[in-house]
Amino acid sequence: MQFSTFKREGGKMIRICVKTRHNKIDTITITGDFFMYPEDSLYLLRDRLVGVTATEHDISEKIKDFFKKENIILYGVNEEDFVNAILKAINV
């Protein structure tokens, strides 16, 4: 398992615990002190990331697509913060 904590200046914290297998996300846990509405959408994001190739492009595309399609409201973080937090964990 690989871990990261990411906090942009003036923002909230995102914690990532991720396991990759064959260069794909096998399991991922996302926590932190940010707010997301609807609240259960965090579980949907986690589920959508499983199986994604562990590259900046693929992770970024999946996250952007998720937030666009699901109409998620974020407080204290943005889509790019999730990408950065995951990449930080994968590259540790």
Image (cartoon, rainbow, N blue to C red):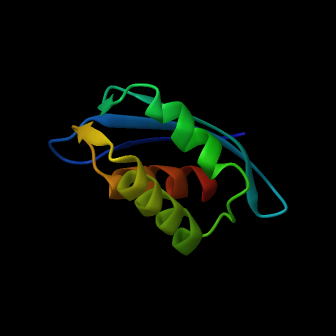
The structure residue drawn at horizontal position 58% and vertical position 40%, both measured from the top left corner, is 46
Which residue shows up at 41% across the image and 61% down it? 64
In the image, is residue 64 above or below residue 55? above
The quarter of the picture where the N terminus appears is top right
Residue at the extreme bottom of the image, as rendered: 57
Residue shown at the point (41%, 55%) measured from the top left: 69
The image position of residue 4, as x and y in percent, is 52, 42
Q: Relative to residue 34, is residue 55 depicted above or below?
A: below
* Residue 10 drawn at (x, y percent): 14, 42
> Can I make out residue 89 in this image?
yes
Q: Residue 66 versus residue 19: which sits nearer the camera?
A: 66
Describe residue 90's horizontal placement relative to residue 39 as left or right.
right
| Residue 76, placed above or below residue 85 | above
Counting from the top left corner in percent of width and height, residue 14 is at: 40, 37
Q: Residue 72: horizontal and vertical position, in percent? A: 33, 43
- Residue furthest to the left in view is 10
Q: How many marks?
A: 0
Q: Quadrant of residue 76?
A: top left
As drawn, the residue found furthest toward the right would be: 22
In this view, the residue in front, 18 or 52, is: 52
